[in-house]
Structure formats: structure tokens, C-alpha cells
């Protein structure tokens, strides 16, 4: 296994049973605890296939630990560029690749916002975010009034987002609305629960492959909870392909889940005219459905 692609990977032995995660990483790789904690904070450490950012997590014998390599210089913006969908005086719309955070990790590193700042010559106005492992459309304001207007649209739900999702399921998915409240189970991990915040996710099936046990869904957000789609789909239908954190036993790519922000619509902050952008997912999304018959049907992005 190439470290450049898969990172350092090992199984927790008896000598590390009960030891903190940061200590286990440091001992296994010959690092200092500060180096180990930085990797954990940056989301580079995976425990049994799920990213773990809890340095004090106790190790158990047999658990699989994977540590992804850090960039050579974490203080620099990465060499990747920007996929610009739309830019004018008021706004900037980008297609974010999976694996790139929207904002820099707490201890530095590459991020979409840093690349946008380099492109614009000043920090962009943040309006919403996508998870690191998710790809798709992200909009920024290019001036203060535009950012304020766009943020209000997202807050009031007059701006809309739709996602394409690859879901593990053995049965076809009926059109439905999932309205389970969402709460924080542990730092960085959410769950449905009666004490959570109200959330609504609307689902429509676009394609289904019974042999591959995969469905391609069009998902509409009516609220904006952390990991909302991932949690709601895992609870009501099945885990997203590639999403080990929420139950996909076949996940193998630590920086890609089967979720893509494909449609973004709002009222233009400069003109007030409704605007809409559509971007289909790239090859890394479809690689999660390799060998299946899933494909986007004609007219999948039609307004309804």
C-alpha cells in the first residue's frame, strides 16, 4: 500500500490498549504528541474508517488506525486551482472538489476560501459551507452588502440547494421528506434524536440498480444542520456510498463520499433576478458506483 495514497495504516495491538489516540499515533509513527495532535485536529486520523478528531479517545485492541500524510508545507495554499462557475462584481460561485475543506483547518492548511482569497485579492464573504468530503457548488459574496444579502437568503431559505446522492439500499426509494431532529452525538458526529434541532430533507429517486444495491437520489435541503443529508439518509434509507462515519461498510476513499451539491439557486444580490447554477459531479463521484448501471436521467435538473 502506497503511503502517498493511503497513509500509514496499522492495527492497535495490546500494548496500546486503553492509550489515548494522540499517544498511540505518536508512538506508532515516531512523532511528538504535538505532531500527532495536529494531525488529529486537521482530520488526518481515521479510526475504523471514520475520521476521529478526539485526541483523548481510548484505543481498543484490533481497531484499525490510519494516518493520512500531511502536505509538505501546511502554511501554503495548495497547488490546485479554482473551478469558477460564475463571477461578477457581487458574487463568486465555485465547484469545490471533495477532499478540500471549505475553510482552513484550525491549525492551518489548504482550503477553498484561501484559494478564493488568492484569486480575488481579499477574503471572500462566506455564506455557506460544504463538508470536506463533499463536492459541489459553493457561493461567496464579493462585497459586504452582497454577502449580507446572500446570507439572509440562506437563513430564510429563499436560496435553494439540491444534491446528488449515491445511497446504499437494496430497495427502491419512494419520494419522501425526512424530518427527524438532528443532535450532536459527539464532537463532529451527528445523529437523529428527539432533543435535536428541527430538520427537513426531501428525497427523490433518479435511478436504482438492484444488483449493485445503489440508488441515485436528488436531495433538497429545507434546513441547514451539520451533516444533515448524511445523517438523514443513513437513518431513513441507507448510508451514502463512501461514508464510513455514518455506516457504509464498503467505504475505501477517506476523502470522498457520494454527495455532490449539484444545483444552487438564489436571487442575485445585485439585480434581484433569480439565478441558478447546475454542475454535474466528476469521475471520482461516479467511481463510488463503479460497475453499476446508475446514470443521470434526461431532465434530472428540471425545475419543479
Image: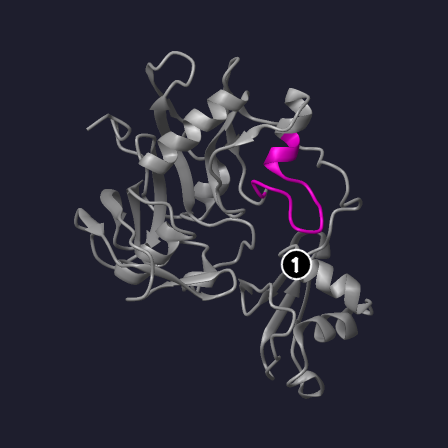
Q: Is residue 10 left or right of residue 261?
A: right
Residue 109 is covered by the magenta coloring: yes
Q: In this view, does 81 lie to the left or right of 160?
A: right
Percent position (x, y) of residue 302? 24, 26
Residue drawn 60% across the image and 35% down it: 112
Residue 159 is covered by the magenta coloring: no
Q: In this view, does 11 lie above or below 252?
A: below
Percent position (x, y) of residue 172? 20, 52
Q: Quadrant of the N terminus?
A: bottom right
**Mark 1 burial class by Cα count in 10 Å: few <14, some 14-19, many 20+:** some
Q: Is residue 45 above or below residue 217?
A: below
Q: How many labels does the image show?
A: 1
Q: Main secondary structure of the magenta part?
A: loop
Residue drawn 49% across the image and 21% down it: 145
Q: In which quarter of the image is the C terminus?
A: top left
Q: Name the residue under label 1.
A: 41
Task: Name the foreground residue: 98 vs 42.
Answer: 42
Task: Name the foreground residue: 294 vs 32.
Answer: 32
Q: Give the range drawn in magenta.
A: 101-115
Q: In this view, does 299 lie to the left or right of 55?
A: left
Residue drawn 37% across the image and 37% down it: 155
Task: Name the foreground residue: 190 vs 244.
Answer: 190
Amino acid at each position: 500500500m502506497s503511503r502517498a495514497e493511503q497513509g500509514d495504516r496499522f492495527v492497535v495491538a495490546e500494548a496500546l490498549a486503553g492509550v489515548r489516540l494522540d499517544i498511540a499515533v505518536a508512538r506508532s509513527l515516531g512523532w511528538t504528541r504535538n505532531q500527532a495532535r495536529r494531525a488529529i485536529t486537521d482530520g488526518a486520523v481515521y479510526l475504523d474508517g471514520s475520521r476521529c478528531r478526539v485526541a483523548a479517545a481510548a484505543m481498543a485492541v484490533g481497531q484499525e488506525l490510519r494516518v493520512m500524510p500531511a502536505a509538505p508545507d501546511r502554511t501554503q495554499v495548495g497547488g490546485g486551482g479554482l473551478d469558477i462557475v460564475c463571477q461578477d462584481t457581487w458574487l463568486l460561485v465555485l465547484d469545490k472538489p471533495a477532499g478540500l475543506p471549505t475553510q482552513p483547518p484550525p491549525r492551518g492548511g489548504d482550503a477553498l476560501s484561501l484559494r478564493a482569497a488568492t484569486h480575488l485579492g481579499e477574503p471572500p464573504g462566506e455564506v455557506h459551507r460544504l463538508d470536506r468530503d463533499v463536492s459541489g457548488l459553493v457561493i461567496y459574496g464579493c462585497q459586504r452588502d452582497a454577502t449580507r444579502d446572500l446570507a439572509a437568503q440562506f437563513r430564510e431559505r429563499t436560496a435553494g440547494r439540491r444534491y446528488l446522492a449515491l445511497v446504499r439500499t437494496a430497495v427502491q426509494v419512494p419520494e419522501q421528506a425526512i424530518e427527524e431532529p438532528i443532535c450532536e452525538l459527539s464532537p463532529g458526529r451527528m445523529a437523529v434524536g428527539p432533543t435535536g434541532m428541527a430538520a427537513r430533507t426531501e428525497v427523490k429517486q433518479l435511478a436504482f440498480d438492484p444488483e449493485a444495491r445503489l440508488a441515485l437520489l436528488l436531495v433538497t435541503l429545507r434546513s441547514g444542520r451539520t451533516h444533515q443529508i448524511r445523517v438523514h439518509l443513513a437513518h431513513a434509507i441507507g448510508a451514502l456510498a463512501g461514508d464510513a462515519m455514518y455506516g457504509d461498510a464498503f467505504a475505501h476513499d477517506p476523502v470522498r463520499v457520494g454527495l455532490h451539491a449539484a444545483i444552487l439557486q438564489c436571487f442575485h444580490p445585485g439585480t434581484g433576478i433569480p439565478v441558478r447554477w447546475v454542475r454535474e459531479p466528476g469521475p471520482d463521484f461516479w467511481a463510488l458506483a463503479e460497475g453499476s448501471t446508475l446514470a443521470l436521467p434526461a431532465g434530472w435538473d428540471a425545475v419543479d
